[in-house]
Image (tube, grey):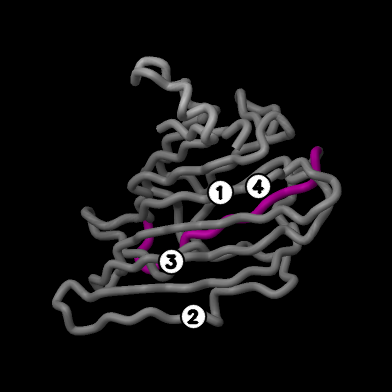
């Protein structure tokens, strides 16, 4: 996937498709879950980069399967370079849209029970995910300027998951880490049980 920024002058200078520049999205790290309690991306560990190298970081979740039914997928950040305690203060919102497999119910709604107001707890990224063999979760999380020492650290999330009661659900959590300290690590987990399987990818995006 390539993200390229153009202006009118750069577009007018293009005479053939081969002259288009290459993309600026770089795969930093891929992790495959296998009955893991958590999946963490820690700057400077196991080839992970999560610093001022990139202004934007993108996490992708592919077929994340919970070991336990009705597990809520969630995440948190750390600004502690030594112990990496995942407890950064956050304020967030949480919107949802869903549709039942039998077409019996559909709605969009704000989920007051899944947002946070100045909380250090883990932020829910989904509702109650099913753990049937064919159920799971996929989506992405965008993190902006985690090493900025002036502003809070914004993030945007889009998740689609198979609800345990056979609904497709799209969740849109968003918010900010309310700190001017560096965010140096991100951790993902389910609220109950392990991450049975799935692929996590971290990308860096330059000059966006």
Residue lying at 85% horizontally and 46% vertically, measured from the top left: 149
Residue lying at 70% horizontally and 29% vertically, measured from the top left: 53
Q: Residues within 10 Å of mark 3 (few under 14, many from 20)?
A: many
State if disc 3 and disc 2 touch (CB < 8 Å): no
**60 horizontally vs 167: left or right:** right
Q: Residues within 10 Å of mark 2 (few under 14, many from 20)?
A: some
Task: State which quadrant residue 169 falls in.
Answer: bottom left
Question: Which disc is residue 142 wearing?
Answer: 1
Residue lying at 49% horizontally and 80% vertically, measured from the top left: 110
State if disc 3 and disc 4 touch (CB < 8 Å): no
State if disc 4 and disc 1 touch (CB < 8 Å): yes
| Residue 180 percent across, percent down from the top left | 83, 52
Q: CA distance from mark 1 to mark 4?
A: 7 Å
Quadrant where the C terminus sits is top right
Q: Where does label 3 land, which residue? A: 171
Q: Where does label 4 land, which residue? A: 144
Q: Is residue 80 magenta?
A: yes
Q: CA distance from mark 2 to mark 1?
A: 20 Å
Secondary element type, mark 1: strand
In the rendered image of this protein, does residue 46 appear above or below residue 40?
above
Magenta residues span 67-81
Q: CA distance from mark 4 to mark 3?
A: 19 Å
Q: Earlier in the sequence, mark 3 or mark 1?
A: 1
| Residue 178 percent across, percent down from the top left | 77, 61
| Residue 30 percent across, percent down from the top left | 47, 31
Question: Which disc is residue 90 wearing?
Answer: none
Q: Residues within 10 Å of mark 1 (few under 14, many from 20)?
A: some
Q: Earlier in the sequence, mark 4 or mark 3?
A: 4
Question: Which disc is residue 110 wearing?
Answer: 2
Q: Earlier in the sequence, mark 2 or mark 3?
A: 2
From the image, state whether disc 4 or disc 3 is nearer to you.
Answer: 4
């Amino acid at each position: 996937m390539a993200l390229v920024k153009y202006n009118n002058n750069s577009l007018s200078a293009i005479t053939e498709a081969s002259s288009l520049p290459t993309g600026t999205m770089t795969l930093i790290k891929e992790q495959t879950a296998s009955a893991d309690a958590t999946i963490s991306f820690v700057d400077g560990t196991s080839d992970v980069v999560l610093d001022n190298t990139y202004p934007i970081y993108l996490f992708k979740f592919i077929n994340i399967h919970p070991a336990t039914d009705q597990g809520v997928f969630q995440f948190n950040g750390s600004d502690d370079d030594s112990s990496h305690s995942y407890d950064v203060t956050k304020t967030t919102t949480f919107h949802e849209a869903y549709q039942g497999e039998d077409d019996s119910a559909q709605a969009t709604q704000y989920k007051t029970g899944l947002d946070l107001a100045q909380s250090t707890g883990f932020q829910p990224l989904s509702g109650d995910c099913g753990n049937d063999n064919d159920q799971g979760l996929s989506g992405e999380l965008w993190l902006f300027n985690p090493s900025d020492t002036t502003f809070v650290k914004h993030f945007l999330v889009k998740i689609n998951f198979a609800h345990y009661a056979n609904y497709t659900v799209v969740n849109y959590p968003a918010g900010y880490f309310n700190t001017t300290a560096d965010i140096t690590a991100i951790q993902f987990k389910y609220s109950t049980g392990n991450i049975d399987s799935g692929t996590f990818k971290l990308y860096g995006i330059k000059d966006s």
